[in-house]
Image (spheres, helix red, strand yellow):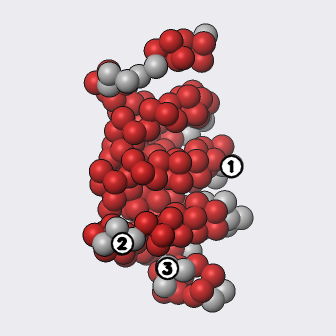
């Protein structure tokens, strides 16, 4: 593994994101948050998109569950760092996270709920175009046998309800067939 493979992430950050310990992956997530803030400050969308691609394709889909968890933490950190600019990257953030909702590892499913919560909390109504996919994923994960995953999905569900309630652009007519 070379540094170039995961650019713009440093080799040290990649190694820390791969770690089995949450505390170490969290350190890498904080480094990613700092990096993204710097990219956003100078409007470097190319580097942000590269980072999202690495986190979403190389990390969130890895065979190693620790790497998937690191990718999910990195995606959430990216969203937090982007703040209101998150709305420009909802596809790149939401799709890899939703893919992890079906993961065999319960901790990955939990991290997926937590990561999506952070993305939705920051992006607010910008996630509404993804509402159907999020609703379907939440519907499936709400019956998860693991209580921590259920609890995380309930928090996400409440946040989505708040966003839909406060939104004037929610497509209720388009939602009704999905609900049926």
SS class, disc 1: loop
Q: Farthest residue toward the right?
A: 63
Which residue is depicted at the point 40% across and 39% down?
Answer: 126
The CA distance from mark 2 to mark 3 is 12 Å
Q: Nearer the viewer, mark 1 or mark 3?
A: 3
For residue 96, side relative to residue 171 (left or right): right
Mark carried by residue 39:
2
SS class, disc 3: loop
Q: Percent position (x, y) of residue 127?
A: 44, 38
Where, by quadrant of the figure, is residue 56 drawn?
bottom right
Going from N to C along the chain, the mark reached first, 1 or 3, is 3
User: The N terminus appears in which quarter of the rendering?
Assistant: bottom right
Going from N to C along the chain, the mark reached first, 2 or 3, is 3
Is there a contact, CB below 8 Å, between mark 2 and mark 1?
Answer: no
Residue at mark 1: 104
Q: Nearer the viewer, mark 2 or mark 1?
A: 2
Q: Percent position (x, y) of residue 108?
A: 57, 53
- In the figure, 140 relative to 103: above or below? above
For residue 141, side relative to residue 34 (left or right): right
- In the figure, 58 relative to 99: above or below? below
For residue 133, side relative to residue 46 (left or right): right
Which residue is depicted at the point 43% across and 66% down?
Answer: 45
Where, by quadrant of the figure, is residue 123 drawn?
top left
The CA distance from mark 1 to mark 3 is 27 Å
The CA distance from mark 2 to mark 1 is 34 Å
Which residue is depicted at the point 63% across and 89% down?
Answer: 2
Mark carried by residue 9:
3
Numbered disc total: 3
Q: Foreground residue, 81 or 50?
A: 50
Going from N to C along the chain, the mark reached first, 2 or 1, is 2
Which residue is depicted at the point 31% across and 72% down?
Answer: 42
């Amino acid at each position: 593994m070379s540094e170039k493979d995961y650019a713009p992430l440093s080799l040290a950050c990649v190694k820390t994101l791969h770690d089995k310990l949450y505390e170490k992956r969290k350190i890498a997530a904080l480094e990613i948050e700092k990096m993204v803030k710097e990219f956003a400050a100078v409007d470097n969308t190319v580097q942000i998109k590269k980072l999202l691609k690495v986190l979403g394709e190389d990390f969130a889909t890895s065979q190693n569950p620790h790497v998937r968890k690191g990718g999910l933490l990195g995606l959430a950190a990216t969203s937090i760092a982007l703040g209101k600019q998150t709305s420009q990257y909802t596809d790149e953030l939401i799709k890899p996270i939703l893919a992890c909702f079906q993961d065999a590892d319960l901790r990955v499913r939990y991290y997926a709920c937590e990561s999506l919560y952070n993305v939705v909390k920051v992006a607010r109504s910008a996630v509404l175009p993804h509402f159907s996919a999020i609703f379907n994923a939440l519907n499936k994960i709400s019956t998860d046998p693991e209580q921590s995953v259920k609890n995380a999905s309930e928090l996400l569900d409440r946040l989505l309800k708040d966003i839909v309630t406060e939104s004037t652009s929610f497509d209720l007519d388009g939602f009704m067939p999905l609900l049926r």
